[in-house]
Image (cartoon, rainbow, N blue to C red):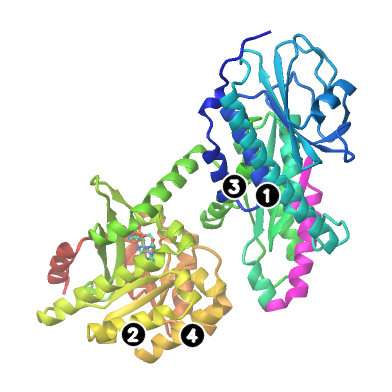
């Protein structure tokens, strides 16, 4: 017999466990996270939750299990019949815990005398009703828990069973709703909660030195367009077909529809490198997109995926899914890349994004966010005809942060609105100052985020700034990226027509960088088409095909009465080509990088 000592649990706090219950909403996820937390913090070899198989203590069924070593057999879903001695013990209401030193007595679950483990059984009851057991297995180096440890363990057990009760009642409610069906009615796949449980079970079963579980979050690009243009029937058809295609994936473990057009599925692979996994999925996505294309021939179907590869048995399904989902969001912005694998660097990126979110209010207050201006040059005269306002962030430590590191994160969490309002105000102030001083003024364009188009505030704000600075509207312009038009056709049109009425020009930014809908250009009143810098290949010579595309896009824009601006121009050769092609305005490093206000004022002096 070992002596009573202290378990690692002297370090574990009930507060930390409670925090988990506050941070998550799905009970199955909370149960899972709590189990992972206990395993990690207590250095457990295994944790199991038993629920009564009948309402007595004679038998239980193991409903949750997490094993940290392969020496302990898997018993998930198994019904356990206990020895009369154990039952007697567990019935004593005042004594709710029982420790088995497996070196000296048989474990009541497997009946074996196991070397090297120590099992602690804790009974959960409400009044007379037996609700289950929590079984914790420690490596035998751990000594018996002290009384203080036991108080902590009991509190954790209460927390865990509280969540189980919530989960069970939700599940009962759900199954009453649709008569026990755990499938998503549309796609025929599992629901998220079932999927989560299945993957948690699969991780210890399959993951080892030679096998990985690949978690894939997929969605269909611009699915909304399908619903809007072809009706929900077509949309549903597309989702059903997607579900079928996913069910047919090689080595599938399980799949679910998360929400809308977001699917998650898991496959098992043998000894694969990230790049192999990516290439395989990329071709699966292409193939599936081709099949789905038959359903909606008028919209370009593209399937995006984010992937997390589970190589560690300690990983839990919920975390793996959230990593895969972050990677999926990248797949949307990485051009041409349909499938992105989550990497360690992305964890670092997420951490940095959190940091920037926290710093934003102070950065605005302390003017650490600065508006830079990049000149726009007329092709004809090679004089300045305008500028674009671009944000730069100088952090307290003196380093600069560029928009690609925070804009998309701020778009997701809505902070972009605060940031842009700040930019707009700075730009208006700058123009007002020059007007008051009688200096030459050029129109300045400002970027509009898709988030602005979710309500009408932006219009009120712009009107407010025009009043406040008594601004002639010919000096301000707004840039909307091409994807904004696609995701928010109605609101974009409304915004543009209000701007038109007020005499504010609108450009379509980043044209040709992503999903371009040519028929949309003809139906939206845009003043300037900004051809994306990707065509300029960072200063490399333009090839024959680039020239054909550029010539024709410029020609088309002219025929539609739009001015054409080309971004990202870095060389004289490019300038000369664009001039010949009929481009009106050039923006790029060749004439000037984005620069702070004083440098920009010098630039205006030189190039006016
Ligand atoms: P954008 O609106 O398309 O801006 C043009 C981007 O191209 C700028 O990057 C600019 O620095 C870069 N660029 C300009 N000329 C050249 C060139 O010759 N070569 C190369 N390689 N790059 C060139 P930046 O400033 O990093 O901004 C990136 C994007 O972030 C912008 O793309 C815009 O979408 C967004 N953004 C920047 N500032 C703001 C802002 O204040 N509000 C909002 N909502 N978005 C912003
Ligand atoms: Mg822009
Ligand atoms: Mg652009």
Marks 3 and 2 sit apart, C-alpha to C-alpha, by: 45 Å
Marks 2 and 4 sit apart, C-alpha to C-alpha, by: 15 Å
**Residue corresponding to mark 2:** 463
**Residue corresponding to mark 4:** 494
The segment highlighted magenta reads 229-256
Q: Is mark 1 within 8 Å of ligand 1?
A: no
Residue 594 position, x and y percent, is 26, 61
| Name of the residue lying farthest toward the bottom | 501
Marks 1 and 2 sit apart, C-alpha to C-alpha, by: 47 Å
**Residue corresponding to mark 3:** 21
**328 or 507: nearer the viewer:** 328
Marks 1 and 4 sit apart, C-alpha to C-alpha, by: 42 Å
Q: Are marks 1 and 2 in contact (CB under 8 Å)?
A: no
Residue 281 visible in the shown view: no
Q: Secondary structure at mark 1?
A: helix
Mark drawn on residue 27: 1
Split into 4 quadrants, where in the image is the C terminus? Answer: bottom left
Q: Earlier in the sequence, mark 3 or mark 2?
A: 3
**379 or 39: nearer the viewer:** 39
Q: Earlier in the sequence, mark 1 or mark 4?
A: 1
């Amino acid at each position: 017999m070992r002596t009573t000592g202290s378990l690692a649990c002297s370090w574990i706090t009930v507060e930390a466990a409670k925090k988990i219950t506050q941070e998550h909403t799905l009970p199955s996820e909370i149960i899972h996270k709590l189990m992972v937390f206990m395993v990690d913090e207590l250095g457990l070899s295994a944790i199991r939750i038993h629920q009564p198989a009948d309402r007595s203590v004679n038998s239980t069924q193991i409903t949750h299990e997490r094993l940290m070593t392969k020496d302990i057999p898997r018993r998930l879903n198994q019904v356990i019949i206990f020895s009369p001695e154990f039952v007697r013990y567990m019935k004593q209401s005042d004594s709710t815990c029982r420790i088995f030193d497996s070196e000296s007595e048989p474990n009541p679950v497997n009946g074996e005398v196991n070397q090297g483990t120590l099992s602690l059984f804790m009974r959960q009851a409400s009044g007379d009703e037996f609700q289950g057991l929590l079984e914790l297995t420690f490596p035998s180096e751990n000594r018996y828990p002290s009384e203080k440890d036991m108080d902590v363990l009991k509190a954790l057990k209460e927390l865990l069973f509280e969540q189980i009760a919530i989960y069970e009642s939700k599940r009962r409610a759900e199954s009453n709703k649709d008569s026990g069906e755990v499938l998503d009615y549309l796609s025929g796949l599992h629901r998220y909660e079932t999927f989560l449980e299945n993957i948690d079970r699969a991780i210890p079963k399959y993951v080892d030195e030679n096998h990985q579980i690949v978690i894939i979050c997929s969605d269909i690009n611009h699915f909304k367009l399908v619903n809007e243009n072809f009706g929900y029937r077509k949309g549903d058809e597309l989702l059903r077909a997607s579900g079928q295609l996913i069910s047919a994936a090689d080595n599938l473990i399980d799949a679910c529809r998360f929400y809308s057009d977001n699917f998650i599925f898991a496959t098992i692979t043998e000894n694969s490198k990230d790049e192999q996994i990516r290439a395989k999925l990329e071709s699966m996505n292409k193939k599936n997109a081709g099949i789905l294309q038959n359903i909606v021939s008028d919209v370009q179907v593209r399937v995006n995926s984010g992937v997390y590869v589970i190589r560690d048995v300690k990983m839990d399904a919920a975390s793996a899914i959230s990593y895969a989902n972050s990677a999926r969001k990248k797949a949307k912005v990485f051009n041409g890349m349909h499938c992105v694998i989550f990497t360690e660097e992305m964890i670092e990126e997420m951490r940095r994004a959190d940091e920037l979110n926290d710093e934003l209010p102070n950065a605005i207050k302390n003017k650490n966010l600065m508006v830079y201006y990049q000149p726009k040059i007329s092709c004809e005269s090679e004089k300045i005809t305008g500028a674009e306002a671009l944000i730069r962030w100088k952090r307290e430590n003196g380093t600069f942060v560029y928009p690609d590191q925070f804009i998309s994160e701020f778009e997701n969490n809505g902070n972009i609105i605060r940031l842009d309002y700040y930019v707009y105000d700075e730009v208006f102030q700058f123009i007002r100052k020059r007007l008051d001083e009688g200096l030459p003024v050029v129109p300045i364009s400002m970027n509009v985020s898709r988030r602005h188009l979710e309500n009408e505030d932006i219009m009120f704000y712009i009107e407010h700034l025009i009043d406040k600075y008594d601004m002639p509207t010919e000096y301000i312009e707004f840039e909307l990226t091409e994807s904004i038009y696609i995701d928010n056709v109605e609101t974009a049109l409304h915004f543009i027509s209000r701007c038109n009425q007020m005499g504010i020009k609108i450009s379509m930014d980043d044209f040709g960088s992503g999903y371009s809908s040519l028929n949309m250009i003809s139906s939206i009143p845009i003043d300037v088409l900004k051809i994306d810098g990707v065509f300029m290949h960072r200063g490399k010579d333009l090839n024959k095909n680039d020239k054909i595309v550029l010539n024709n896009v410029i020609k088309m824009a002219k025929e539609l009465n739009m001015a054409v601006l080309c971004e990202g121009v870095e060389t004289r050769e490019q300038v000369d080509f664009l001039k010949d092609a009929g481009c009106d305005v050039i923006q790029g490093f060749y004439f000037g990088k984005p620069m702070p206000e004083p440098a920009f004022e010098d630039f205006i002096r030189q190039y006016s």
